[in-house]
Amino acid sequence: MLWNEKIEKMDRSSMRELQLERLKATVKYTYERVPHYRKVFDGIGLRPDDIKTLRDIEKIPFTNKNDLRDNYPYKMFAVNLKDVVRVHASSGTTGKPIVVGYTKDDLENWSECVARIITAAGGNSEDIAQVVFGYGLFTGGFGLHYGLEKAGITVVPSSSGNSERQLMLLEDFGATIIVGTPSYVLHLSEVAEEMGLTRNRHKLRLGLFGGEGHTPEMRAEIEKRWGILATENYGLSEIVGPGVSGECIHQCGMHFNEDHFYPEIINPDTGESLDYGQKGEMVITTLTKQGIPMLRYRTKDITKLIPEPCKCGRTTVRMEKILGRTDDMLIIRGVNVFPSQIESVLLPMEHIGPQYQILVTKKGFMDEIEVQVELIDGSLLEKFSELEKLENSIRHKLRSVLQIDSKVKLVEPKSIERSLGKAKRVIDLRAK
Ligand code: DLL
């Protein structure tokens, strides 16, 4: 089944024509409305009508997360706030989040993109979908929610957390689709096992997973434990949220919504454009966004593009699963975490030194994060109640900045290994 056959099976040259027409319009629109872009264009003497072919996109400088941070909260918006009907936000490299805004048309296009992905994965109006993504500033919950509704699917917006209750709803409401991060859904399978929720007591048949990566091994495990087909989808707040690309039932790369987003792959060191099939950093330009259009946004995600048509008949380019990131952003249970956010919490605090280490592990299938910090005075280790008070206060502050729970362990002064070169702040022990 296809949600939008005309677009999803469009011949390549018509797609390129459509993309060029939309690219030219977006460049002009962005230049006229966003002071940041006007400054960037004027700085190098580039004019919107210099973009005459799709290749000319390479003349446009990249946009980075920092540009969004520097224009916090609304200065990258291309419309007045009165025309923005929704905002979402994701972690920035400092305490301040990255803010994105949607017009009514943006929300409509977003739901359309998500509906295509759901349909490609095999969802249809007979289904009931339980969304276990968080509903809030994170784009995952609301993004999937409206796309599912558009596809005519019954949505159970149970949001994240409270696993026992999730599973009770899963059984009682009869969800056939589960939507969330792969790690959380795998974790739910462990809780289900403890609760004796066996295959004959639930109706799940399909999983839509995104927000973080998962290995083929983890996919196989999820499929086996739940008895479902596990499909993957990809997106990022700066571009739209979920709905940028998603797998069809053949599970062989994520179909890109190319009429709304233009993908490029670049060499992350030189910025040079790479061809289809070559591995590099994905750069995305929005082609229809009104609220916050993005020109050549550097995602930091490493992947490659697959141009061959798929067995499903879709002609849209596919992207391979993300192989890693070029920066130090960690994805913990689907939530973006930067070591710099943790550092900004720790450094101003009393009784602890500037040396810390972040340990990332998996407990069962759930990501766990432990922040180890050196005490200034080691004798505090013997004063349990003071120690506990300090640990709790750090944990509390971390939670308010990161939006997820972490463990805190206070350790002896000078016990964290010093590095001669760059400090190794993160020890990621999750299997790659
Ligand atoms: O995670 C949007 C999303 C929500 C996509 C739900 C799919 C489902 P952000 O919080 O801005 O947005 O995080 C974006 O998450 O740059 C990737 O590094 C990572 N990411 C998202 N999907 C995948 C995936 C949402 N399927 C960042 N595989 C991106 C690997 C993913 N990484």
Image (spheres, rainbow, N blue to C red):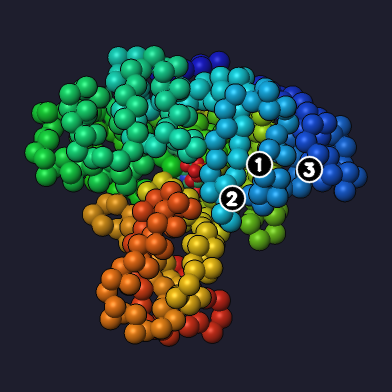
Q: Which residue is mark 3?
A: 36
Please state if 394 lies on the left or on the right of 42 as rendered: left
Q: Amino acid at mark 2?
A: Lys
Which residue is found at the position 56% from the left and 54% from the top?
95
Which residue is found at the position 37% from the left and 84% from the top?
378
Q: Is residue 259 above or below residue 238?
A: above
Earlier in the chain: of badge 2 and badge 3, it is 3
- Disc nearest the viewer among 2 and 3: 2
Quarter occupied by the C terminus: bottom left
Total marks shown come to 3
Which residue is found at the position 78% from the left and 42% from the top?
36
Q: Which residue is mark 2?
A: 96
Callout 2 secondary element: loop
The answer to whether residue 254 shows anywhere in this view is no
- Number of residues whose C-alpha sits closer than 10 Å to that of mark 2, classed few (under 14), some (14–19) or many (20 or more): some
The CA distance from mark 1 to mark 2 is: 9 Å
Q: Residue 304's x, y, as percent?
A: 54, 47
**Furthest-right residue in view?**
45
Q: Which residue is mark 1?
A: 73
Q: Are marks 1 and 2 in contact (CB under 8 Å)?
A: yes
Callout 3 secondary element: helix
Callout 1 secondary element: loop
